[in-house]
Amino acid sequence: MNASDFTGRSVIVTGAGSGIGRATALAFAGRGAGIVVADLDAKAADEARAEIENSGGTAVAVVGDLSEQPVVDKVVTTAIDTFGSIDVLVNNAGIMDSMSAVADVTDAEWERLIRVNLTAPFLLTRAVLPHMLGAGRGAIVFTASEAALRGSSAGAAYTTAKHGIAGLTKSLAVTYRHHGIRTNAIAPGATLTGIRLDIDPDAPGPQALMPYMGNAGQPAAAETQAAAILFLASDAASNINGAVLPVDGGWSAV
């Protein structure tokens, strides 16, 4: 059997309406998986679903804020009702901060970044785990960031949230490795996506961080990140667990 064949398996992809999430959903669908397209943007989610179906795949869209428990429950229920199982969870959805330094981070920015980038994937993972445990198998892949590996790739809130994702990845890997569940993450560097950036270049955070950004190199295509996610979820990576894989053109090595 082809190790990258996902025929008969179901995959939840968050943030699947655009960028890395959309490329990931299309990649899994192209290898036979049924896809739950989860996104906050209803139009983007429906367009991604339609693109998968027009390419001969199977997909269903769920719209809502994944930091809200009822939306999490709807995603899981939809996956089970539609496909009968949850084989892969890709926790990809996230937002950028304004690259604010700690002294300049507002309560609102902090709470929003932590809620969307760390709490939401925790909630969905917690909701999915009983189904994977019942099946005795599953793969979870997070989209972390270069900011999960260093302190010079984003603002304080984003960096803290992505460090949390790296810790959550490793905790899950250790806790559930004897239950047939693997958990890994990619750490993208600069990538061509539609993620919104709202940065004041004269603020203390960007002033401190910008000198490091020249090491980022050429931005990757979203499909490059999707290929790494698909690999980590595939049987080809059956002995990889707890890894945070840089997909950054060597930025993390500089």
Image (cartoon, rainbow, N blue to C red):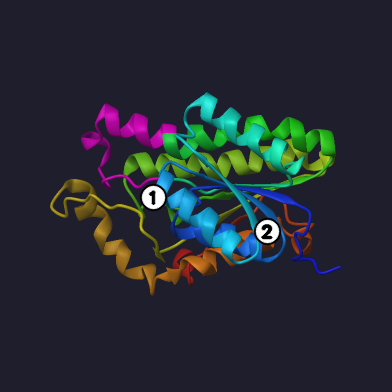
- Closest to the camera, between mark 1 and mark 2, is 2
Which portion, as a residue range, is magenta? 95-115
Query: Mark 1: which secondary structure?
Result: loop
In the rendered image, which residue does mark 1 sit on?
A: 151
Outermost left residue: 202
The amino acid marked with disc number 1 is Gly
Outermost top residue: 70
In the displayed structure, 37 sits above or below 78; it is: below
Q: In the picture provided, is 193 more to the left or to the right than 4?
A: left
Place of residue 241 in the rendered image (x, y in percent of width and height, measured from the top left) = 72, 51
- Mark number, residue 232: 2
Check the picture and name the quadrant holding the N terminus: bottom right
The amino acid marked with disc number 2 is Leu
Q: Residue at x 26, y 63 (%)?
A: 211
Place of residue 220 in the rendered image (x, y in percent of width and height, measured from the top left) = 44, 70
Place of residue 217 in the rendered image (x, y in percent of width and height, measured from the top left) = 38, 73
Query: Mark 2: which secondary structure?
Result: helix
Q: In the picture provided, is 63 more to the left or to the right than 171?
A: left
Q: Does residue 149 appear anywhere in the picture?
A: no
Q: CA distance from mark 1 to mark 2?
A: 25 Å
Outermost bottom residue: 218
> Magenta span has 242?
no
